[in-house]
Image (tube, rainbow, N blue to C red):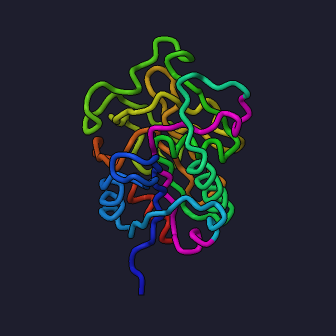
Amino acid sequence: MRTRPVIGLTLDAEEPGGYSKLPWYALRQNYFSAVAEAGGLPIALPHDPERAAEYLHLIDGLLVTGGAFDVDPALYGDASQHETVSLKPGRTEFELAITRAALKADKAVLGICGGEQLLAVAFGGTLIQHIPDAVPNALPHEQPNPRTEPGHAVAITPGTRLAAIVGEGPMHVNSAHHQAVATPGPGAVVNAVAPDGVIEGLEHPGHRFALGVQWHPEYKVDRQDLTILRAFVEAARG
């Protein structure tokens, strides 16, 4: 009998070179170890959109991870593309397919960093393509200090699911993104904001657990980061 909810984690994809002369998948170990510490049984999900429904049947919760790439602006209705935008179409196609299927099945979904942005797109929202060009006096959201340290604070929106999980005081988080959510999508709400006004989290109250954060709680920089992962795993338990 299974005692831990199975959490599927999306992988990053790399072109030949470095680890292998063939295309390869990758994901930091701390994603898996943090999910395990939070009470889940983590498994990796390769990029196969046609089998998204089969993968979804195997898991209790979906964690959409981050990565050094962007969602295609065409997917949220933007005909332009900023020069800094970098795409991984195969990964995005799979992540959108399994995220939409998970939301339809009302399974728990957590989006981290780029995964939060993809979740916004799945909700019907839009993205800022490059923060320095769109937000006056923006903070350095690609922080110069190590990711194991906080880059800035975020204010938690009172009355949200995130506030119920971590409390309403500020969190001190790491920051590794040049894009951000512009609009969260119909029915979705913003649950965290940086001091410069950049959206740092969102959620959709119409689902069992559909929540995204722009930072990386798997690093456990803030004392409440693991609390977010535990709440997600508990929601996946059903």
Q: Is residue 236 above or below residue 81?
A: below
In the image, is 131 to the left or to the right of 33? right
Q: Does the rendering let one see residue 227?
A: no
Q: In this view, does 74 lie above or below 217?
A: above
Q: Does the rendering let one see residue 70?
A: yes
Name the spot of residue 150 as percent of width and height, x first.
29, 33
Outermost residue, front side: 21
Q: Which of 17 and 66 is in front in this view?
A: 17
Q: Nearer the viewer, residue 11 or 22?
A: 22
Name the spot of residue 65 as percent of width and height, x first.
46, 50
Position of the N terminus, as image quadrant, is: bottom left
Residue at the location (69% across, 61% down)?
104
Count of number-bearing discs: 0
Residue at the location (39% across, 74% down)?
4
Name the spot of residue 122 as percent of width and height, x first.
66, 47
Q: Nearer the viewer, residue 141 or 16?
A: 16
Magenta span contains residue 65: yes
Outermost residue, bottom side: 1
- The quadrant in which residue 54 appears is bottom right
Q: Give the range drawn in magenta.
A: 54-78
Q: Which of 92 and 168 is in front in this view?
A: 92
Name the spot of residue 203 as percent of width and height, x first.
57, 46
Outermost residue, top side: 137
In the image, is 38 to the left or to the right of 102? left
Magenta span contains residue 58: yes
Residue at the location (55% across, 29% down)?
85
Q: Is residue 228 above or below residue 198?
A: below
